[in-house]
Amino acid sequence: MNDLDRDPGRDPGGLERDLRAAVRGPVDLSVTARALHTMDASNYRRVPLAVVAPHDADDVAAALDVCRRRGVPVVARGAGTSIAGQATGTGVVLDFTRRMNRIVSLDPEARTAVVQPGVILDDLRAAAAPYGLTFGPDPSTHSRCTLGGMIGNNSCGSHSVAWGTTADNVRSLSVVTGRGDPVRLGQSWAGAPEGLRPLVDGHLALLRTGYPDLPRRISGYALDALLPERGPDLARAFCGSEGTLGLLTEAVVRLVEAPRARALAVLGYADESAAAEAAAGLLPYGPLTVEGMAADLVRASPQETLLPRGGAWLFVEAGGESPAEARARAEAIVRAADVLDAVVVDDPAGQRALWRVREDAAGTATRIPDPGAPAGTGPGHGAEAWPGWEDCAVPPARLGAYLRDFRALLAEHGLRGTPYGHFGDGCIHVRIDFDLITPEGVARFRRFSEELADVVVAHGGSLSGEHGDGQARAELLPKMYGPELVALFARVKDVWDPAGLLNPGMLVRPAPLDSNLRFTPLPREPVDVAFGYPSDGADGGDFSAAVRRCVGVAKCRTTTAASPTDVMCPSFRATGEEEHSTRGRARLLHEMLAGEVVTDGWRSTEVRDALDLCLSCKGCRSDCPVGVDMATYKAEFLHHHYEGRRRPAAHYAMGWLPRWLRAVAVTRTAPVLNALARVGPLAALAKRLGGIAPERSIPPVAPRTLRQWWRGRPKDRSRPASVVLWPDTFTDHLSPSVGRAAVRVLENAGLTVALPPRGVCCGLTYVSTGQLDRARAVLRATLDRVAPLLAAGTPVVVLEPSCAAALKTDLVELLGDDPRAHRLAASVRTFAQALEELAPRWRPPHVGREAVGQTHCHQHAVLGDAAERRLRAKAGIKGELSGGCCGLAGNFGFEKGHHEVSVSCAEEHLLPSVREAPGDAVVLADGFSCRTQLGQLAGVRGWHLAEILAGALEREAGAG
């Protein structure tokens, strides 16, 4: 092998040529592909040379052959949610999610399924569900993690007390070894590489005594599965090897019978230690789960969460053939437990609500709130916290004592972290506020890691109880297993992979746990930005810290919304491409700041292209566990990217929409423009010049604006205004009927309405197109005009959700140093919030109809819709609105090149809900974009809630 082959980085073109000649699947050496795969969900970062999406097992073998000949490392990757760094690498990354993602077969009688490594767990569970079956292990990432990744890490999840680890549920594996040999591994020595059996036979005594006995022992190679008295079981031994021994191409997995009914007992204890010490005593009752968490991970009040009294809780699920049987088993567990308080829930909605509290811990743990932070603090607020000691495990009976020692060690090092997790298996998750940026902080990270490893071993535990060793813990394996057994691991690795090219630096001969940290290449000085980012960085305002928010758990990569009300991430669900996920865009921004892969900073075309399909729906602001706000990051990027340069035509046509529409109103030329827009050739020319998608119709401009109607309306000036109705651009110029209806309802509720002075604007269209200097100027002028209203403290009712969200968030993040901005943001109310707060005794008219439609994505993400739900219920409007995004999203769906994605987003929830609605259902759509999308794609009229209530008032008046 020549020197050039030994340094493939000097000849990436040759590597690309060889790979393209050998494999049928896509081969990508682009900046975007490499940047997207530098990180997983761990603290580590490595820059790959290429990304290959193998088409089948032959592609896997061919790619490995090319890499072996050229001395290039190979890393197998699923969803990239690994927390120990094992899904990162410097060579060729094999992405199994794109092509090798099929369920090959499912046999309900044998209770087995044959799957490719890229199959998403939830897809397998959905396929098995009609037969009353499921796959037992269920990590919290079940909506996006792959079976290949689960096998590589020997994943577990909350139901492992009932159904074990992934290794317990594997029948056989098809693997390409590091030598290039395709083999099938099962419950025998068949397929073992030459030399493995003699190596094992020569160390039987060590294998019989070297492993701790506990249910969640994931660390190291499971060589004890090869003991003669246990089988041997090569498939089990391969599980948890983290892609270091061979490349999985297919698996036969066991399915288990899913209980027909479930009931959830939530047991309240005084504190975390009491809950931990009680967990093992519940195992004889055969629960499906014994999950634990403490009160410091709950960001809402007990009334909101339905949790029983206590400072910590166990979530214990029981199953049965019927709801009565499941409930009886749950109640028996409550009687057997010594608890402060308990609740048993058997209705599915209540169980989902409670499980959401527990599952949200995985996100809330990534930010540690400051002492005294109020309950209900949203996602992403507080000090940064990182993995690294995410999933140690000890014997369940030792858990209480271990947690006390763990807390003491945290305090000794001046660190904070909140444990939670699988108490019934003795496995603890925790994220800790390590400083992984400064040399002093990294040194403390190492000292703490070494000392905690000693604590875990002293309690008879495993350094990893779920997510594997990777780089995070492999260096410390000699503390757990001793040097002789760790040396045996290395010899086993060499038998399977003589060239040492499969995921090097992981598990065996590991890189130091404090090297390759993903924070190292980021700039140390704050980046000059337009937004304030008040919650990012030690003192706020740190764009690097904002980008660091994405820890890679990939909730944005789900192929369906995580819950019926979630929004994030519509563009990924439309395209399936990583670069169109929130995580993918965050990775590109990270690499832009790092400057190693993406080298042209704010001028990067790769970042621009990835952000181009971001709808700015803000769904990630609420649905992302750590509150990544990609809409803001996109606006920031566009601001810098086009600084001093000509912008796309759409930025002028739609970004400056308030200015154009005001000119139309002043000249009273709306009828003329509307007539011209109906002339095909003229409309086509206008759309081409304005960067508007040719598939779109230009919305008509109202002949009479809301303000013009208001000026001609008699008003009672003897009473001071109790509310100010904000005439946003869309309501004023394009949909004034909504404003007129709102005035009708607000006055019926006894409120006195006023409009603010002319020229006020929330700046939304300038923000969404990244024209932030202009947005700031517009907002400053607005604050000047509304200063008297702010001084009077008059609430401001904003009918358009996107404009309300802009005033709530963008205003203060752009002008945070102006106290008037904070006062205006605090004064903003939605239509329903204003009625509930200012007219609490008012009873709305009875509508008595079912409603369909979609909660506006900005309402969901920023404003919340609790008041709207209560108002609809009082008015007799039945039915639930769906989640997701309508796909028009302001200027997004109108821009040339976005129509296909816009339609795909609408087809996910909104349009199907309308098509399936009863004939007399009313279509609710509070946003102008949503109403426009409904009209243009479905020919359906959407109504603002104010219009529905105003119509009902008119009918009541007519009937009277």
Image (cartoon, helix red, strand yellow):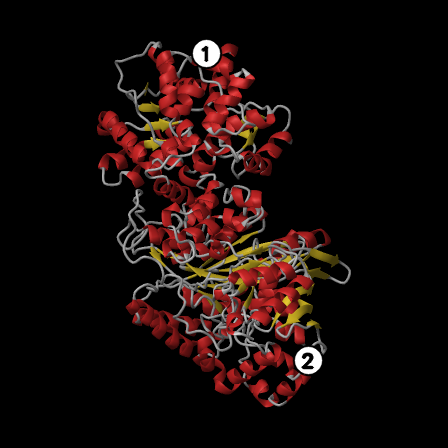
* Amino acid at the residue labelled 2: Pro
Quarter in which the N terminus is drawn:
bottom right
Determine whether 674 is above or below 480 in the image: above
Residue 322 in view here: yes
Determine whether 842 is above or below 20 in the image: above
In-image side of 316 versus 299 (left or right): right
In-image side of 24 versus 377 (left or right): right
Q: Position of residue 607 (x, y in %)?
A: 44, 47
Q: Which of the 4 image quarters holds residue 65?
A: bottom right
* Amino acid at the residue labelled 1: Val
Q: Which residue is mark 2?
A: 232
Determine whether 537 is above or below 852 in the image: below
Q: Which secondary structure, mark 2?
A: loop
Q: Nearer the viewer, residue 561 or 393?
A: 561
Q: Position of residue 499 (x, y in %)?
A: 57, 76
Q: Position of residue 590 (x, y in %)?
A: 40, 54
